[in-house]
Image (tube, rainbow, N blue to C red):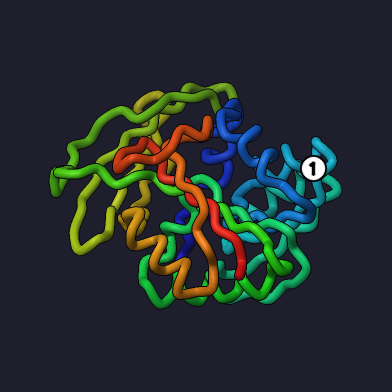
Amino acid sequence: MTDPYDILAELYDAELAGFDADLDFWRSRARGRVLDLGCGTGRVSRYLRSRGIPVVGLDRSERMLERAVAHTPGVFFFRADMARFAVRGFANAIAAWSSFQFLLTREDRARCLACVRDALLPDGLLTIDLFAPVAGAPATSPRKLATEFAWEGRRVSKFESAKRAGGILSLRWEYLAAGKYLADVVQHVAILGRGEVERELEEAGFAVFAAWRDWRENPYADRGPRLIIDAARV
């Protein structure tokens, strides 16, 4: 089965090219060597490296990693499933931009957290950035223009529609330029609340010590837009 991000790698890179709202937050978390889980095209890894922070990136998409390697000299990237990898000796692990939510089952998330715990040094820090659940969200969200961005001299429009069922959010992304389709993919992500994530972390051997609603570190109080959790390996 083709990974949607293998199809979207170039468009994803262009869409997030100017996005930097979370970068200083990730730099503030670094205590030493950082493992960037679901690193994509290396946006966060690249920034951390530019600030002198040693970082290693992991992603399952071959095409995303190709772009990460091409644009991020000095960083080692490797291809692996977030729920099945083995590395050691990290002070931090980060799961930016909702990457943890692409693990759809509790079992896969537990396997991921076990791998992360093994990767971290004693008292190492894990930070997970999720989109916050919305109470009373409808079962379906109609197609709408989500964003526009430049790519290869063209203006690209990204349309998004969504369906929610059984704790899974199915997102359809349509990318068009001059009325012609560039890509049309469906991606599935888990809808995770604070209590659920904190229980899974504690069961995996982490102690949760903070929850934030945004990258400016405003405390989380049952509403987002983000749900960002800091937890320490115990």
Q: Residue at x 60, y 29 (%)?
A: 20
Residue 10 on image: x %, y %: 58, 41
Residue 231 on image: x %, y %: 55, 58
Q: Residue at x 19, y 44 (%)?
A: 135
| In this picture, residue 149 sits left or right of residue 123 | left
Q: How many marks?
A: 1
Give the quadrant of residue 80. bottom right
Quadrant into which the C terminus falls: bottom right
Which residue position holds label 1? 49
Say which of 58 and 157 sits in front. Answer: 58
Q: Is residue 7 visible?
A: no
Give the quadrant of residue 219. top left
The secondary element bearing badge 1 is classed as helix
Q: Residue at x 79, y 57 (%)?
A: 76
Residue 157 on image: x %, y %: 39, 28
Residue 99 on image: x %, y %: 49, 54
| In this picture, residue 234 sits left or right of residue 178 | right
Say which of 150 and 215 sits in front. Answer: 215
Using the image, determine if residue 21 lies above or below residue 97. Answer: above
Kind of residue indicated by mark 1: Arg
| In this picture, residue 53 sits left or right of residue 29 | right
Quadrant into which the N terminus falls: bottom left
Disc 1: CA contacts within 10 A as few (<14), some (14-19) or many (>=20): some
Q: Residue at x 35, y 37 (%)?
A: 224
Q: Is residue 157 visible?
A: yes
Say which of 161 and 180 sits in front. Answer: 161
